Image: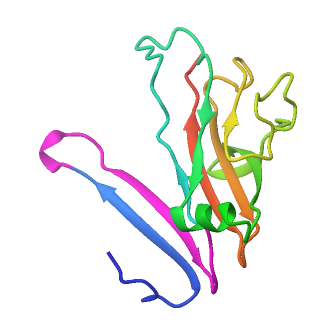
Amino acid sequence: QLPASSLPPGSYAIALTISKPSSGLAAASETLYVELVEGSVPAVVFQALAALKFNPTWSTNSDRVALTTSLDVASLALQAAGLVAFAYEWKAFVRIAGADMLADLDLGDTNAVTTTGLGGPNLAFRSGALTAGVLYRFALTVTGSSQPAFGAVMVQMNRA
């Protein structure tokens, strides 16, 4: 844990590798990219995806995916006091050959794709809107404070 303001503004990559040599399993690695900026930035918190419908045989597609976020307590207090109004915008990407490409999904289509639209803190997809086997990255931008906040989560859909 680093004390507040111990790093100057800039781009940082934080890498984590987890392994257990005696297990015979491959190591798992992930990298988190962080952009530190001057000013007040709300913290975007993603709630864990609920595993409501476990399908061990991968014989059916996922019924529904819902992403739920919230802002940190200080940002919510500023909003409740009327000192700031936050705006939300979601984007969807697919991972192709290691690169993120904009997904062919109209997140604003509340009839066929989402039940929430793209302008709120949560993003809920209609059953069948996401393609089985595809690795998606859903990115959220929150504006309204001195600096925008960004958050993203990756979701691997069940295989067909």
Q: Quadrant of the C terminus?
A: top right
**Could you tell me which residue is drawn at 24 percent across and 51 percent down?**
19
In the rendered image, the residue lying farthest to the front is: 81
Q: Magenta stretch?
A: 20-42
Q: Quadrant of residue 86?
A: bottom right
Q: Is residue 96 visible?
A: no
Q: Is residue 155 above or below residue 10?
A: above
* Towards the viewer: 107 or 160: 107
In the rendered image, the residue lying farthest to the left is: 22
114 is within the stretch colored magenta:
no
Q: Quadrant of residue 113?
A: top right
Q: Is residue 143 above or below residue 28?
A: below
Q: Residue 21: image x %, image y %?
A: 16, 49
* Towards the viewer: 25 or 137: 137
Q: Is residue 39 visible?
A: yes
Q: Quadrant of the N terminus?
A: bottom left
25 is within the stretch colored magenta:
yes
**Could you tell me which residue is drawn at 72 percent across and 46 percent down?**
93
Q: Quadrant of residue 130?
A: top right
Q: Residue 159: image x %, image y %?
A: 56, 20
The image's colouring method is rainbow
Q: Is residue 31 above or below residue 124?
A: below
* Towards the viewer: 44 or 81: 81
Q: Residue 37: image x %, image y %?
A: 62, 82
77 sits left or right of 120 in the view: left
**Could you tell me which residue is drawn at 50 percent across and 44 percent down?**
47
121 sits left or right of 115 in the view: left
Q: Residue 39: image x %, image y %?
A: 64, 84
